[in-house]
Image: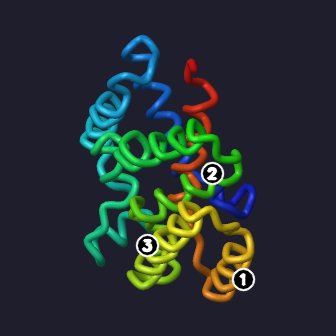
Amino acid sequence: MFRAIRANAHRGYIFLSGLVLMAACAQGGGATGLGSAVGDLARAFFAAHGARDSHGAGLRERLGLGGIRAEAEAGLPAVFDHGWPAYREALEAGWAPDHAAFYLMAVLMGQVEDTTAAHRCGPEGLARLRRDGERLRRLLERGKDPVPWLAARNRAYVRWRLTMGGVADCMALVFALEATSPS
């Protein structure tokens, strides 16, 4: 993928969405028990195929991070136990869709062990995501407009080369699950 388009094109999302789709098909559709089915498939996949040479594999070895592999093997708790419920609660509470999405991002920043951030900025990058996720959550819960703060954070993240690929992948998965879930 990188050779073809000069970007990883969210390989994590492609992997995760494939796992979720396969798990949903295996259990006949529906979201009930989907996390557990995802975990079963992920563990079987990694048992059969082992670890590939990747940034995540290197970080697992050097820093002891589990990254997307551990998240998938655990059944995507950042998505099913934290992110999606928080997003739904925000929408059901009447939050504007963009603020509900920001809230989802804040929750995931505190949950996802984002190896993209760790690859670019080390453990300090992950710690920064955690702190900033908490700050964003507090802003939203107090009814403050987060856009000025987010714009300033974005400029700082660009300077630091800090990206949240894993958080973005999990956000996209929550949006896909929400869009395909019966109301």
Three-letter amino acid code at the position of disc 2 = Ala
Question: In the rendering, at what x and y percent does residue 169 appear?
Answer: 56, 51
Local SS, label 3: helix
Residue at the spot of label 1:
155
Task: Identify the image quadrant of residue 122.
Answer: bottom left
- Distance from Cα at disc 1 to Cα at disc 2: 20 Å
Q: Nearer the viewer, residue 89 or 117?
A: 89
- Distance from Cα at disc 3 to Cα at disc 1: 18 Å
Q: Which residue extends farthest top?
A: 28
Relative height, residue 60 to residue 112 (above, below): below
Label 2 or label 3, whichever comes before in sequence order: 2
Near mark 1 (Cα within 10 A), the count class, few <14, some 14-19 or many ≥20, is: few
Q: For the residues carrying marks 1 and 2, which lies nearer the camera in this image?
A: 2
Residue at the spot of label 2:
101
Near mark 2 (Cα within 10 A), the count class, few <14, some 14-19 or many ≥20, is: many
Label 3 or label 1, whichever comes before in sequence order: 3
Q: Nearer the viewer, residue 83 or 112?
A: 83
Three-letter amino acid code at the position of disc 3 = Arg
Local SS, label 2: helix
Q: Nearer the viewer, residue 66 or 105?
A: 105
Three-letter amino acid code at the position of disc 1 = Arg
Residue at the spot of label 3:
130
Question: In the rendering, at what x and y percent does residue 37 appear?
Answer: 32, 28
Residue at point 29%, 44% (across, down): 73
Relative height, residue 60 to residue 45 (above, below): below
Q: Nearer the viewer, residue 176 or 43?
A: 176
For this view, does 157 lie left or right of residue 33?
Answer: right
Image quadrant for the C terminus? Answer: top right
For this view, does 115 lie left or right of residue 75?
Answer: right
Question: In the rendering, at what x and y percent does residue 20 appear?
Answer: 46, 32
Residue at point 52%, 51% (across, down): 12
